[in-house]
Image (spheres, rainbow, N blue to C red):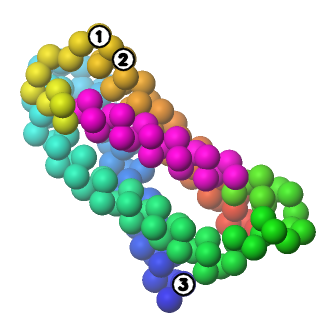
Amino acid sequence: MMDIVLYIHLLAATVWIGGSVFLFALGVFLRDKEAQKRVYFHVGPIYGYVESVWLTILIISGLWMFFHLGLDRIFAEGHPQSIVHILKIKFSLVALIAVATVIHMYIAFKTNGKERTPMQKMLSRGSSMAIFLLNLLILWFAMQLRNFL
């Protein structure tokens, strides 16, 4: 069962991170602002729904592994502080990415096909950048955690 959950977790991470990297790259490399608007108008909502499902799967499968691997006991027992530290950081980063995703999706769905205010642009771009960078950090800490397991 653990192999299946790990497979689903890795698949969800691949979809989540791959999708965010792809959309981030579109924002950077698609220089024509009108083309960007057209692409995001059509792709954005689809991406939002698909990625919400995969992020949810990612969090659920991560929590399942956390409890079924007995990692919850690590906090209570005398395990090396390094693994506890990595787990705390990873959980904090996941919480931050969830918040950034909610902010980004709220603005994206509210303003899809409309002109954004300067504040909405700042929050949307900032949350998008945060999602991108947090994905890379979470992946790093996941690799560090895997070294202990």
Name the spot of residue 61 as percent of width and height, x first: 47, 70
Name the spot of residue 59 as percent of width and height, x first: 47, 61
- Position of 35 compared to 84: left or right? left
Q: Farthest bottom residue? A: 1
Gap in angstroms between the C-alphas marked 1 and 2: 6 Å
- Position of 66 compared to 107: left or right? right
The kind of residue on which mark 3 rests is Met
Q: Which mark is residue 2?
A: 3
Range shown magenta: 88-108
> For residue 81, which quarter of the picture?
bottom right
* Residue named by callout 1: 118
Name the spot of residue 54 as percent of width and height, x first: 34, 60
Q: Nearer the viewer, residue 50 or 91?
A: 91
Residue 95 drawn in magenta: yes
The kind of residue on which mark 2 rests is Met
Residue 8 seen in this snapshot: yes
Q: Farthest top residue? A: 118
> For residue 137, which quarter of the picture?
top right
Instruction: Kindly state the secondary structure of the residue where label 2 is placed.
Output: helix
Q: Which mark is residue 122?
A: 2
Q: Nearer the viewer, mark 3 or mark 1?
A: 1
- Position of 1 compared to 39: left or right? right
Say whether marks 1 and 2 touch (CB < 8 Å).
yes
Residue in the picture at 36% in, 17% down: 122
Q: Choose the circle earlier in sequence order: 2 or 3.
A: 3
Residue in the picture at 61% in, 71% down: 66
Q: Choose the circle earlier in sequence order: 3 or 1.
A: 3
